[in-house]
Image (cartoon, grey):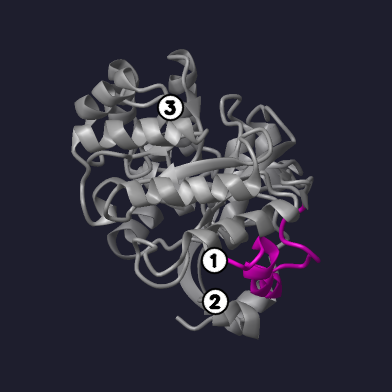
Amino acid sequence: MIVTEIESYRVRVPVGEKAASHGVSGDIWVTEVATNAGYTGYEFYPTVGRNLERARRLVVGKDPHLIEQFIADGLIYAPAVETALWDIIGKAANQPVYKLLGGAKDRIPCYLTCVWPGPADQSGVTYQQQADDLAYYKKHGFKAGKIRAFRRPIQADGDAVATIRDKVGGRDEFQIMIDRTGPYSGTIWSMDEAIIMARRFESLEVTWLEEPLNRGDVFEHSKLTATVDIPITGGEGDRGLTMFSRYCRERSYDILQPDTMNCGGLLTCKKIGGMAEAFGLDCVLHGTHGLLLASRLQNAAILPNCWILEVALTNPPLLPWEQWEHCLALVNQDELFQIEDGEMLLPDRPGLGLDVNAEALTRYRVS
């Protein structure tokens, strides 16, 4: 079996009125890898420009199983091609990818990262609305959610969490995570601000505080982690192994959070998880939504130190299956993912677990 072609294109599928009114777009990127054996692999993420040409040069005409060789030669810059190759390998073996890579679990709890419309700092939504929406998700079986901490003054987000905590109950009933996202919040906390807020969130039983300082700052995060008790997390923007090895060595984070696409692919992410495990750290992947969540689910299932899966970004008050309902137009299945009591089940379909409708991709293709 050899790879014969790699394409990356965009499709546009109709979106229901409710989802569209809450900002859901029908535009979906597809990376497609074909073989001479009739197996086609898919990942729903773009591979464009130089990275597409690089991937074609490295992979076309070769055995799709040679993933380590491809990564060494530069496929880390085309991660969607790598995950599409795993899709092919799984289909050829008639096994889900997570089982081929030593699956550690067949179901995993998930949490919803919520972003409300309006200003990015969420100043356009009241604390009570945030509390009501998370309580709504709790009512539908979810046991964890994450919100941004972008507001000024900084104590405002502590007040928001206090309101949410009063509504959803204690941590044993519903976990709350906080996403500071470093400089992407618009401002960078000082160390004093980070310590103040870490301790406030800890008093409110927050599960973790994500990227509270400047992204990639190994040593300042290390100081913060050594100072406070609440787990500090980060790493979603880093590629390859080098930065993650520094995070481990300096104990910058209590939990590493690689993004499967940003870090360079499924296999690189697995290596980061193993590195974290060696240092006694958890590895909870940075999340996504819709069709792209399929590979993230497979990736989470092969990491013994990944205990929860992020579904991001969720647009309240949409439930996840309402937000990805339009994606069903591209697959031959009645539901995209099976969720029971706040846990996502690993599908038994081969590859990445999606039965993609190739004719639908052609029908909805726009570029």
Residue that numbered label 3 is attached to: 230
Please name the residue that numbered disc 2 is placed on: 22
- Could you classify mark 3 by the number of other residues whose Cα lies within 10 Å: few (under 14), some (14-19), or many (20 or more)? many
Residue type at mark 1: give it.
Asn
**Three-letter code, disc 3:** Ile
> Can you give x and y, in whole percent of width and height, for residue 260 in the image?
46, 44
Any magenta on residue 266?
A: no
Q: Is mark 2 on a helix, strand or loop?
A: loop
Q: What element carries label 1?
A: loop
Q: Foreground mark, 3 or 1?
A: 3
Q: Residue at x 44, y 28 (%)?
A: 255
Residue 315: which numbered mark, if any? 1
User: Which is more toward the observer, 12 or 6?
Assistant: 12
Name the N-terminal-most of marks 3 and 1.
3
The Cα atoms of the two marked residues, 1 and 2, are separated by 7 Å
Label 2 packing within 10 angstroms: few (<14), some (14-19), many (20+): some
Q: Which residue is drawn at 30% across and 16% down?
A: 249
Q: Can residue 2 be seen in this view?
A: no
* Picture coordinates of residue 220, whole percent (x, y): 21, 28
Q: Does the magenta stretch include residue 324?
A: yes
Of 317 and 62, which appears nearest the observer?
Answer: 317
Instruction: Tell me the quarter of the picture where residue 309 sits.
Output: top right
Observer able to see residue 71: yes
Magenta residues span 316-338
Q: Residues within 10 Å of mark 1 (few under 14, many from 20)?
A: many
Sequence-first disc among 3 and 2:
2
